[in-house]
Image (tube, rainbow, N blue to C red):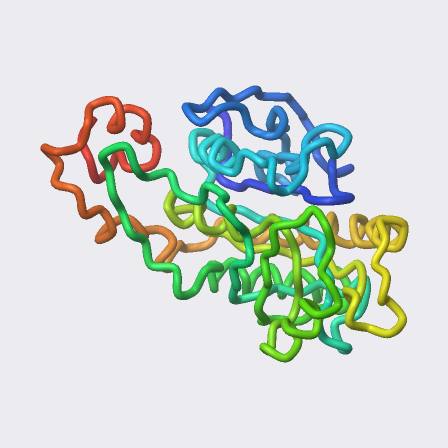
Amino acid sequence: MPQPIRIGIIGGSGLYDMAELQDREERAVTTPFGDPSAPFVVATLRGRRVAFLARHGPGHRLMPSELNFRANIYGFKTLGVEWMLSASAVGSLREEYRPQDIVIPDQFFDRTRGRISTFFGDGLVAHVAFARPFCPLLSDLAFEAVGRAGARGHKGGTYVCMEGPQFSTLAESHFYRRAGFDIIGMTNLQEAKLAREAEICYTTLALVTDYDCWHPDHDSVTVEMIVANLVGNARTAQQVMAHAVERLPIERACECARALATAIITRPEAIPAATRTRLAPIVGKYVAP
């Protein structure tokens, strides 16, 4: 019997593949929300079956605001994923978070506009708890993996998720620092919200590429500056991911695993049949098809 696919990996800017993936097969997944960013690569990593997805698609062709977050997370859910490790490039808002450091954040602040970040609607309403947006158990494991990989890491901090694709203005960058935020990126918030609704444990490796424009040496953030650090970050991130995967599975004694248990507010008899069917992989254990 084939090993189940219980671990998902999302590769961000610079991390479009993983050299250690073995026994690869591409698996195209169709979802009610459209197509994911790319076919999933189902493979073996350190003895565990994983599903890898390049967030921005082949050749980095999708902007953050163009990502079909629902299709990506729904695809992982239908493959059987219970733990999701994400990697993404971020700017640093703190002097001590240096380029090529890795941050395991524990909070978000939303600066996006109009992005779809829920599976619900169309006659089915649910409100999941999101006070602690990252799985604490998986985050602990990821931070430990950072140390095992010999990387410089930081545990905790607030990730400001901005709309993009432009970088911050100087006024915005200084505002975020005065507010006490730590890193800034463009992608992870919607993933985390949808993973929570799908009862998937989620954490991210925030790979610092620059100091954002507040820093006197980085007052004009450029793609060239970022790409130069992405290469080193990608190598390190692959090692960290592999070390983390080695430690899975772990007991899911966290709120992620039962996020929907008390979140669905719509009366069962009022849920439209089409919505029940579409969301069966998400709500099936709580709402009969």
Please provide percent x and percent y for residue 80.
44, 34
Please provide percent x and percent y for residue 109.
52, 64
Please provide percent x and percent y for residue 143.
62, 65
| Residue 10 in the image: above or below residue 101 | above
Q: Residue at x 61, y 30 (%)?
A: 37
Is 33 situated left or right of 272 in this image?
right
Please provide percent x and percent y for residue 206.
67, 58
Quadrant that contains the C terminus: top left
Is 71 situated left or right of 129 in this image?
right
Q: Residue at x 44, y 35 (%)?
A: 77
Q: Residue at x 24, y 37 (%)?
A: 124
How many numbered marks have been drawn onto this rendered protein structure? 0
Front residue of 259/243: it is 259
Front residue of 182/101: it is 182
Q: Residue at x 89, y 71 (%)?
A: 217
| Residue 136 in the image: above or below residue 59 | below
| Residue 211 in the image: above or below residue 53 | below
Front residue of 104/69: it is 69
Extreme residue toward the left, this view: 269
Is 81 situated left or right of 245 in this image?
left
